[in-house]
């Protein structure tokens, strides 16, 4: 009898039965929840391209370059009209962002090539969503504020790669913008592949000597002083990608054009352009930066980034993985103060650094970029690493060639 009692309690103990049932219910619930999650809530990004025709804006040369105020204002207005439209529609939760890739001329008017990003559950197909997007745009047609916009003739579904390819043909986009994602916070000092896609390594006898900046598929901008020891194009090559040991691309240098009035004594006009032997095919990790307008104001106190393979300490060795530093623009007046450079900073130069020092360009960074992000998340070149009193000292910021001052010279030399 005691034996039988033991057997009974082992198999029919109400607690055991209770826990077994609870366990089964939990497993079932989790399975169902996962199914629902993947079928209904797991969202995928979808990209669409459409061309909006703006009827009441006349095309002018000012809309040729993304650096003009007109270009920024018009693109920004179109983006905000599209955003408002979707935010007030039944697609408000699916719409993520719109970005004008390019403004083009059409007759006397303007066409805005635009990429839009949406997020839908996976079980939705992108094509049925396309007709919902079209119908939202149709409904909103008469509600575009003071822009007169023609309904796009077609909306094209893009693959993620198509969307990236559209951006790589234009200047100044980093990977976070190409996928219309949240802005990536730039931290640390090591760059990741694609972070600074316009960065070039200029190599003398196949050894990294200077930085350079890709401004078209064939022209690289750099500093004149890079060629003080040697200006024979046959001795120079350019590599692309964040590693100087394993570059993604390599080109010979065909021509070196140094500013006629470069003055090694005062560092004035420290600018040069280099023509590659053949064009670079742009991709996500290698493409050009935007150039500012000659009239663009570079605001003291605004944030900028300097990148390069230069030494980390004055007198140190260059590095093989690209580094980035965050600095602030310093006015020429402050930079010319007696404790700073005491008048040695000319109008064609630009200072950037931290008041306490510590982050700076150094030997080997010369010729490389100082860039700033604009309101539409495009990156513009504002300076070329030129000179400074050692590296990272307090009150001795880096001094850069002021790109706006040489905007016309760059066009004269390269057509860019
Ligand atoms: C150089 O020797 C050099 N701290 C470049 C930049 C700076 C100093 C020196 C700025 O090429």
Image: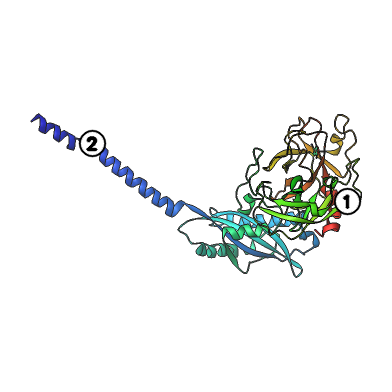
Image quadrant holding the C terminus, namely bottom right
For image coordinates 30% across by 41% down, the residue present is: 23
For label 1, count other residues whose C-alpha is less than 10 Å away and answer few (under 14), some (14-19) or many (20+): some
Locate residue 160, reporting x and y percent.
57, 58
Numbered disc 2: secondary structure? helix
Numbered disc 1: secondary structure? loop
Task: Residue 301: name its quadrant.
Answer: top right
Mark 2–mark 1 CB contact (< 8 Å): no
For image coordinates 63% across by 67% down, the residue present is: 152
Residue 236 appears anywhere in the view:
yes
Indicate the colouring scheme.
rainbow
For label 2, count other residues whose C-alpha is less than 10 Å away and answer few (under 14), some (14-19) or many (20+): few
Would residue 139 appear left or right of 4 to someone viewing this image? right
Q: In front: 111, or 67?
A: 67
Task: Residue 251: name its quadrant.
Answer: bottom right
Locate residue 232, reporting x and y percent.
83, 52
Q: CA distance from mark 2 to mark 1?
A: 87 Å
- Whether 104 is drawn above or below 184: the answer is below
Q: Which residue is mark 2?
A: 16
Q: In front: 381, or 182?
A: 381
Residue 286 appears anywhere in the view:
no
Q: Which residue is mark 1?
A: 259
Query: Does the numbered disc 1 mark a residue whose Cβ is under 8 Å from ligand 1?
Result: no
Image quadrant holding the N terminus, namely top left
**Ligand 1 is found in which quarter of the picture?**
top right
Locate residue 68, reporting x and y percent.
78, 54
Q: In front: 22, or 191?
A: 191
Locate residue 330, reporting x and y percent.
80, 37
Mark nearer the viewer, 2 or 1: 1
For image coordinates 79% across by 52% down, the residue present is: 235
Query: Which of pointers 2 and 1 lies earlier in the amino acid sequence?
Result: 2
């Amino acid at each position: 009898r005691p034996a039988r009692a033991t057997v009974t309690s082992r198999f029919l103990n109400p607690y055991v039965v209770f826990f077994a049932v609870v366990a089964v219910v939990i497993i079932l619930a989790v399975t169902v929840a996962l199914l629902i999650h993947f079928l209904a809530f797991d969202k995928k990004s979808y990209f669409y391209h459409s061309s909006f025709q703006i009827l009441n804006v006349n095309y002018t040369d000012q809309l040729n370059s993304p650096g003009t105020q007109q270009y920024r204002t018009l693109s920004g207005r179109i983006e905000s009209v599209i955003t408002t439209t979707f935010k007030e529609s039944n697609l408000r939760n699916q719409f993520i962002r719109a970005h004008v890739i390019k403004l083009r001329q059409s007759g006397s008017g303007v066409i805005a090539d635009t990429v839009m990003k949406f997020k839908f559950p996976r079980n939705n197909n992108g094509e049925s969503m396309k007709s919902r997007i079209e119908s939202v745009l149709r409904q909103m047609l008469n509600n575009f504020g003071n822009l007169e916009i023609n309904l796009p003739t077609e909306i094209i579904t893009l693959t993620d790669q198509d969307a990236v390819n559209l951006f790589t043909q234009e200047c100044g986009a980093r990977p976070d913008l190409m996928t219309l994602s949240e802005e990536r916070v730039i931290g640390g000092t090591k760059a990741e592949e694609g972070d600074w896609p316009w960065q070039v390594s200029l190599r003398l006898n196949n050894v990294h000597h200077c930085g350079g900046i890709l401004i078209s598929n064939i022209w690289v901008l750099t500093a004149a002083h890079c060629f003080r020891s040697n200006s024979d194009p046959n001795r120079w090559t350019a590599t692309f990608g964040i590693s100087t040991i394993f570059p993604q691309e390599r080109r010979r240098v065909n021509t070196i054009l140094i500013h006629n009035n470069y003055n090694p004594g005062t560092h004035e006009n420290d600018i040069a352009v280099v023509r590659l032997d053949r064009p670079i095919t742009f991709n996500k990790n290698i493409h050009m930066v935007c150039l500012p307008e000659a009239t663009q104001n570079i605001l003291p106190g605004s944030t900028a980034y300097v990148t390069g393979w230069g030494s980390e300490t004055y007198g140190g060795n260059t590095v093989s993985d690209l580094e980035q530093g965050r600095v602030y623009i310093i006015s020429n007046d402050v930079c010319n103060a007696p404790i700073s450079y005491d008048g040695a900073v000319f109008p064609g130069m630009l200072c950037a650094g931290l008041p306490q020092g510590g982050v700076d360009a150094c030997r080997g960074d010369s010729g490389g970029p100082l860039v700033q992000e604009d309101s539409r998340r495009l990156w513009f070149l504002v300076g070329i690493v030129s000179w400074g009193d050692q590296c990272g000292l307090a009150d001795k910021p880096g001094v850069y060639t002021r790109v706006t001052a040489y905007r016309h010279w760059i066009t004269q030399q390269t057509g860019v």
